[in-house]
Amino acid sequence: MSEQDMILRMENICKAFPGVQALNHVDFEAAPGEVVALVGENGAGKSTLMKILCGAYRKDTGRIFLHGREVEIENPYHAQKLGIAIIYQEFNLTPNQSAAANIFIAREPRQRGLGRFFNCVDRRRMEQEAQVHLNRVGARVPATALIRNLSVAQQQMVEVAKALAVDARIIIMDEPTSALGEDEVETLFEIISTLKKQGIAIIFITHRLEEVFRIADRVVVLRDGQRVGSMTISEATPEKVIHLMVGRELTDMFHKESAEIGEPLMRVQGLTRRGVVEDVSFTLRRGEILGFAGLVGAGRTDTARLIFGVDRKDAGEIWIEGKQVHIKSPVDAVEAGIGLVPEDRGLQGLVLKLPVQENIVLPSLDKYARGGWVDQRSLLHTAASYVDKLNIRTPHLRQKAMFLSGGNQQKVVLAKWLALNPKVLIMDEPTRGIDVGAKAEVHALMSQLARAGMGIIMISSEMPEILGMSDRILVMHEGRVAAILDRAEATQEKIMAYASGEINKNSA
Amino acid sequence: MSSVKPAQTGGAVTMAQPRGIAWRNIITRPEFGVFLILIAMGFFLSLYTNTFLTSVNIFNILRAFSWIAISAFGECMVIITAGIDLSVGSVMGLAGLASAMLMARGISVPVAVLAGLLTGLIVGFLNGLMITKGRLPPFIATLGTLLMARGLCYGLTGGWPVRSLPQAFRNLGQYDIPVAGLGIPLPLIFMLIFAILTSFFLTRTVWGYRIYAVGGNETATALSGINTNRVKLMVYSLCGLLTGIGGVLMTARLGVAAPTAAQGYELDVIAAAVVGGTSLTGGEGTILGVLIGAAIMQVLRNGLVLTGVSAYWLQAVQGLVIVVAIMLDQLRKRRQ
């Protein structure tokens, strides 16, 4: 296909966020009626690239051509006018309004005559036209139906109809199948082929490789903000794609010091929360760092939340040191000797408004209290000793947590659990968004804790971190344990193959 | 931990906790701004009237806002957890009425007073239950109890006030303790005692730490293994109890329990807390601030009377002061 036939061409797109080059001279193109799959690891830059295309982010440099004409996409509204629509994983629908109202949101047809003067919506016309668009995508949804009464798949169809209603020529779908059942995925694929025939270009972001080979005409692979490959589906093989996705050198340094791995500390059996986590079982040993690998949405964080009692489990048993524990809330989990360093420091880990010292002592308050009265000296002493030990850089203990850097905030979250000395520490993305120095400090601390006999579960989306720090690696795929690999046998390719569902030990 | 020598302990703590100059600590305290407003108002009033700065007038002010302040200590705790209690005015009325009705039926004063306090505690506890177990937003739950408690006041009395309360009871609100030629009102003493108690409770106990944590970030607090519902239940119960105490004192002072008593006081109570620097988004607030806030509202009321401004203007000025005080507070925070 020649250059002129392309409906979309993006050239040399660059975008930097503080501390990361999210996109580094990335090219991308799509032809009318073409389904392009965009794949890559977590953080490879897929979403950033698409957000630039649909006007949610501004690019730093680079050029975008639509139908051969250069355009400067200013905002989402502008992108929509240019015929670019995006369907996010989280739908943008108002649940208490009808499908028709959502399809025509902000462009409702007005009544004629006096009604026009008062800006009255012509409901009948709106519903009729909405129905036409719904029928175009083959949705058996009445235009008058309220969004909240529709299934997830039907809501997605409304989103597609909404895109058609603005006459979109390019439709971006961000992980459209992640919330769908098998039958619904089939329906979606039928819709995609219908759109294809109408000459609409579809950009399909996905983590599931088998879908790429079923539906896409071409696959584009991003890695670390760069485009590392583009091939037609006939040239591609799963092995090739996986290799391109992960094919980086392991250059980062890790403070992995071998700890003596002791007897089993925590055993999890058949942990299930329907539709999210299915039958997860594993054993964590004393002194072990068990890495949880997998793609975003594979159920790693959900597993942690089930263990910690944040969400209610449908089934599953947990034993600690050979005794079964019944965890119904984080209160029980802490009592059982489990700590959780959550994914989001600001929202879940810290009380940003409160001083460093109060954050550090929060879970362990009872330790410094007699009859409810806090012994300020022992509290201050503890807080100060952890600030010292973990090298937390803060002007003083009364500094509010919000004024610390990300790395130091993370160390405060760690300190608050260390003060309680848990047996098991679950760390969800422990080094996300912190600088290299702090990262190394956190890693060194993890090794130190493991040596002291703690069992650590480390959820991480960074492959080098998983490979560098873990004694064993549990790979999750769609809520299930796809594999548990030993440090010696684990490779990036293997992990990615299990994580993307390309190999599946359980079903094999 | 116990193996660390005290000498080292001292070193580490002072390293991380600079004492600084005491003066600096005072002016950077969040209460300092509203304190200045209070001083400015007092200064202005003592210049323009020769009645403001008399011991009689000052004690009148202090007595008159003591029950508002005591209830506001509870409200302050509720607001620190990022909640709100709209029912305090009605609860004040109901608690006083409960005591009065029992005494009118010949029940002894201590028992009747306890019953009044218990009434406050129970309503507060119900508020807490509706908010935690019933998952109602605090605004809705306490709006409901505002109406229910007030309705009870009317229903139980048929709209008639309860009069002729025993002198022993009225003394709680009316007695002045003679100290060095001055008569210090008993309610003022109660207010100071409860100010100290709640302040210590908030800053020195495990519960107090948890109250600030819940309001600062409920998710993070729950994920730290703290039962946040229990914290909230306690806070609403305490607010009810303190409000009950305020209601009993108010009734003792007035010597009559009207079903309309304390109507609309919830706004005075919330205003006292908020003017005193308690943040409606939670996690921030001090009892000292509330005390100053309550004082400002009462000095304002008193000042308008003394300067001869018509009472009809009172609410307009109060509203203005609330808005200005909080705007100044926001400015202070933004500069931080």
Image (cartoon, grey):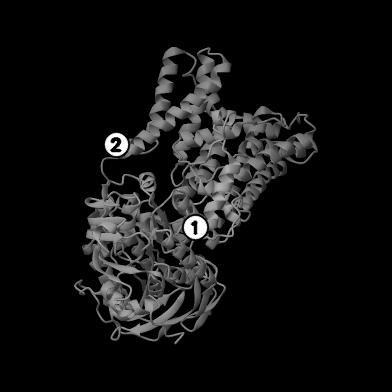
Q: Is residue B222 above or below residue A77?
A: below
The residue located at (48%, 60%) in the rendering is B222
Q: Give the residue drawn at x 24%, y 59%.
A: A3
**How far is mark 1 from mark 2, CA to CA?**
32 Å
Indicate the secondary structure of the residue bearing disc 2: helix
The residue carrying mark 2 is B23
Q: Point out the image quarter for the N terminus of chain A.
A: bottom left
Q: Position of residue A456 (x, y in %)?
A: 36, 75
Q: Secondary structure at mark 1?
A: loop
For disc 2, the chain is B
Near mark 1 (Cα within 10 A), the count class, few <14, some 14-19 or many ≥20, is some
In the rendered image, residues at marks 1 and 2 fall on the same chain: no
Say which amino acid is labelled 1. Gly
Instruction: Please say if A55 is above or below B46.
Output: below
Q: Position of residue A450 (x, y in %)?
A: 32, 77
Q: Residue type at mark 2?
A: Trp
Label 1 sits on residue: A372
Q: Dividing the image into 4 quarters, which one contains the C terminus of chain A? A: bottom left
Disc ID at residue A30: none
Residue B161 relative to residue B239: left or right? right
Q: Nearer the viewer, residue B282 or B233?
A: B282
Q: Position of residue A497 (x, y in %)?
A: 35, 79
What is the chain identity of the residue bearing mark 1? Answer: A
Q: Position of residue A371 (x, y in %)?
A: 50, 59
Q: Can you see residue A374?
A: yes
Between B298 and A180, the residue placed more toward the observer is A180
Q: Is residue B181 left or right of residue A407?
A: right
Q: Is residue B299 visible?
A: no
Camera-side residue: A145 or B134? A145
Residue for point 45% across, 38% down: B288
